Image: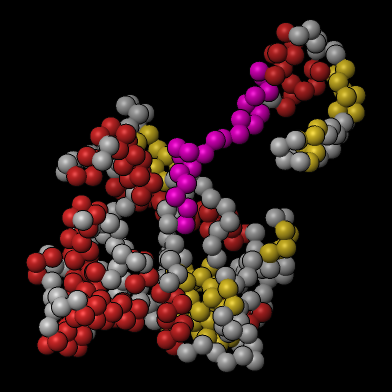
Amino acid sequence: MALYLNKIYLGNRAYGVGAAAYVYFGKSVHDLSLSEMAVIAGLPKAPSTLNPLYSYDRALKRRNLVLQRMLEENYITREEYDSAKAEPIVAKYHAPQIDFSAPYLTEMVRMEMYQRYGENAYTDGYKIYTTVIRKDQLAAEQALRNNVIDYDMRHGYRGAQEVLWHAGQTPWDDKAINDKLKGIQTYGPLIPAVVLSADAKEAQVVLKNGDKITLDLKAVRWARKFISDTAQGATPSKVDAVVHAGEQIWVRQNSENDWLLAQLPEVNAAFVALDPLNGGIIALVGGFDFELSKFNRVSQSLRQVGSNIKPFLYAAALDKGLTLSTLLNDLPISRWDAGAGTDWRPKNSPPTYAGPIRFTSRFRSI
């Protein structure tokens, strides 16, 4: 049981009762009050949703249930029960100050340590030093996110993330909106928000932290309607042509601290910079946001070889007896893909076909 309690996940990156006591209350286990002990004891069932940082009401209800069971099993007296139940839950996130975060690289280091030392990697107190340079890592993350956002914006606005209430329906109250936003993750610079009202000139929006902001026409000007990868609608001339009351949207601040409408990008990217003298990693970003996608596009994704394969194919063709004057038929082809259950039909880029052509003409595209 001691081993289990020292390793169990209890929410907010806290593994074990001791870690949970520090994360939620900033104390050691021995300094916890009965009420605080009951809060932590109630977490194993659903640590992500029963912790007091996620939902005070759920944590309070769960704590009171734990106290009730302790009373029924005679672990505490009626006086202790009444006193603990009357105590409010005062919790906030406590964690060591981290100078900067490189989660994709950190996960690579964790995997390497685990491969070398197994479970001892988590308990033997290793100190790990990397070649990452702080300013370069921060610059890489910022550059990747800015360019992914810019690219995604150029392709148009795909609409609200979710509609909480429609026109003519009763709007959600402040508590319901707050609870909804608390359960939504922030991704990089993208902050979840709910539109409270919107007209032609501006929209009133509430953020995850409860602050209220205004989005004017300038903030949504970029949001041409997404039609396809190559087509977008007209530039909006009214705010309420883009956002509407009841919508859960995303917002971000630009370099001038102005609030802008945003959206979760559908594209992603990766970045790695190496020291040319020793091969050490200076900066590594495996994606737009680690919480949005933990897939590391630097170390785990497979690149398409593209035109790099052409010299090898052409060399093999020449080796098989083709000559530079051999005629080839440049026409669409179709091959049955049993795995996909459909035809595979590769296309030229651009999608035009020249018919009979000399083998030598293909070398122009290498």
Q: Position of residue 279 (x, y in %)?
A: 35, 29
Residue visible at 34% across and 66% down?
Answer: 45
Compared to residue 359, the image places residue 108 above or below, namely below
Q: Which quadrant of the figure contains the C terminus?
A: top right
Compared to residue 17, the image places residue 288 above or below, namely above
Q: Nearer the viewer, residue 42 or 266?
A: 42
Compared to residue 216, the image places residue 42 above or below, namely above
Compared to residue 333, the image places residue 73 above or below, namely below
Is 110 left or right of 356, judged from the image as shown?
Answer: left
Residue 9 lies within the magenta run: no
Q: Position of residue 134 (x, y in %)?
A: 29, 47
Q: Position of residue 203 (x, y in %)?
A: 55, 83
Residue 310 lies within the magenta run: yes
Name the colouring of the figure.
Answer: secondary structure
Residue visible at 27% across and 37% down?
Answer: 118
Q: Is residue 214 visible?
A: no
Q: Nearer the viewer, residue 314 or 136?
A: 314
Q: Position of residue 38 (x, y in %)?
A: 21, 74
Q: Where are the magenta residues, as a range?
A: 292-312
Q: Nearer the viewer, residue 235 or 300?
A: 300
Q: Quadrant of residue 50?
A: bottom left
Q: Which quadrant of the figure contains the N terminus?
A: bottom left
Q: Quadrant of residue 136?
A: top left
Residue visible at 24% across and 73% down?
Answer: 39
